[in-house]
């Protein structure tokens, strides 16, 4: 159910097609963001009418509310969103940056204080993969990268890169059994 091929190339630019369980995505692609399982002001019919092929949903926000188990009980993220085309879920890593005042980072992952109920939630690379698998994502983003701001000193950027490497290794180990068989995972 997973396939990728290059349809055209011009210098370093290329176009291709990515076949996923819920459809084929032609690349390059514009991906609307449905942070909390909805693209603001647009219905699924509106998204189809404007040619959206894939939607990005946010793992952290869906974990906080309504919760991945609730979404799974309702038939998975595709049914929850009434979107039968492909979905990509992020790792929750952007929230390491955007919710800086509500999180603590350590070698094992990130502990967030929920902006909804004040509760604490630990997001590790393995947990991010588990949440995305429970949601039923077509493409799961595996690593909880540590983002630095655009005006960060190079030492901050280097520290973020170093902090993200173990996350990538942990994500790969968690990803293999949940999303295999996949031609991209050894």
Image: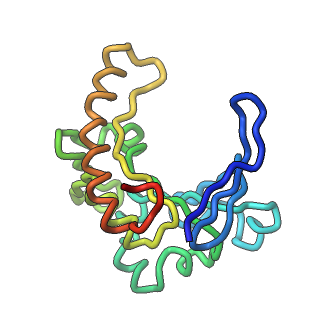
At x 53%, y 78%, the residue is 80
Q: Say which residue appears at 64% left-offset and 61% top-offset.
A: 54
Q: In the rendered view, tell whether residue 105 sits above or below residue 65.
A: above
Total number of numbered discs in the rendering: 0
Relative to 86, does residue 99 appear above or below in the rendering? above
Question: Does residue 104 lie above or below 18 as drawn?
Answer: above
Q: Residue at x 42, y 43 (%)?
A: 94
Residue found at the very far right of the displayed protein: 49
Q: Nearer the viewer, residue 73 or 120?
A: 73
In the image, 24 versus 164, the foreground residue is: 24
Residue 159 horizontal/vertical position (percent): 28, 23
Coloration of the structure image: rainbow
Figure quadrant of residue 81: bottom right
User: Where residue 71 appears, x then y in whole percent?
Assistant: 43, 78
Position of 122 compared to 135: left or right?
Answer: left
The residue at 69%/30% (across/down) is 12
Locate the C terminus and report the quarter of the image it occupies.
Answer: bottom left
Visible in this render: residue 29? no
The quarter of the rendered structure image containing the N terminus is bottom right
**Apparent side of residue 93 relative to residue 84 in the rendered image (left or right):** left
* Percent x, y of residue 91: 40, 52
Position above or below: 109 against 186: above
Residue 111 place in picture, x, y as percent: 22, 49
The answer to whether 162 appears left or right of 23 in the picture is left
Regarding residue 96, the answer to whether it shows in the image is yes
Give residue 43's quadrant in the image. Answer: bottom right
Q: Nearer the viewer, residue 171 or 153?
A: 171
Q: Is residue 99 left or right of residue 103?
A: right
């Amino acid at each position: 159910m997973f396939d990728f091929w290059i349809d055209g190339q011009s210098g370093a630019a290329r176009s291709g097609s990515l076949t996923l369980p819920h459809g084929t995505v032609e690349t390059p692609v514009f991906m609307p963001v449905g942070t909390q399982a909805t693209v603001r002001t647009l219905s699924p019919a509106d998204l189809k009418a404007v040619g959206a092929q894939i939607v990005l949903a946010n793992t952290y926000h869906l974990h906080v509310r309504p919760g991945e188990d609730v979404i799974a009980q309702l038939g998975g993220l595709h049914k929850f969103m009434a979107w039968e085309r492909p979905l990509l879920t992020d790792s929750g890593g952007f929230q390491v940056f955007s919710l800086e005042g509500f999180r603590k980072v350590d070698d094992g992952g990130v502990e967030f204080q929920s902006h909804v109920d004040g509760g604490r939630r630990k997001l590790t690379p393995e947990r991010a993969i588990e949440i995305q698998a429970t949601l039923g994502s077509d493409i799961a983003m595996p690593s909880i990268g540590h983002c630095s701001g655009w005006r960060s000193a190079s030492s901050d950027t280097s520290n973020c890169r170093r902090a993200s490497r173990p996350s990538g290794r942990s994500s790969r180990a968690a990803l293999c059994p949940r999303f295999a068989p996949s031609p991209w995972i050894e």
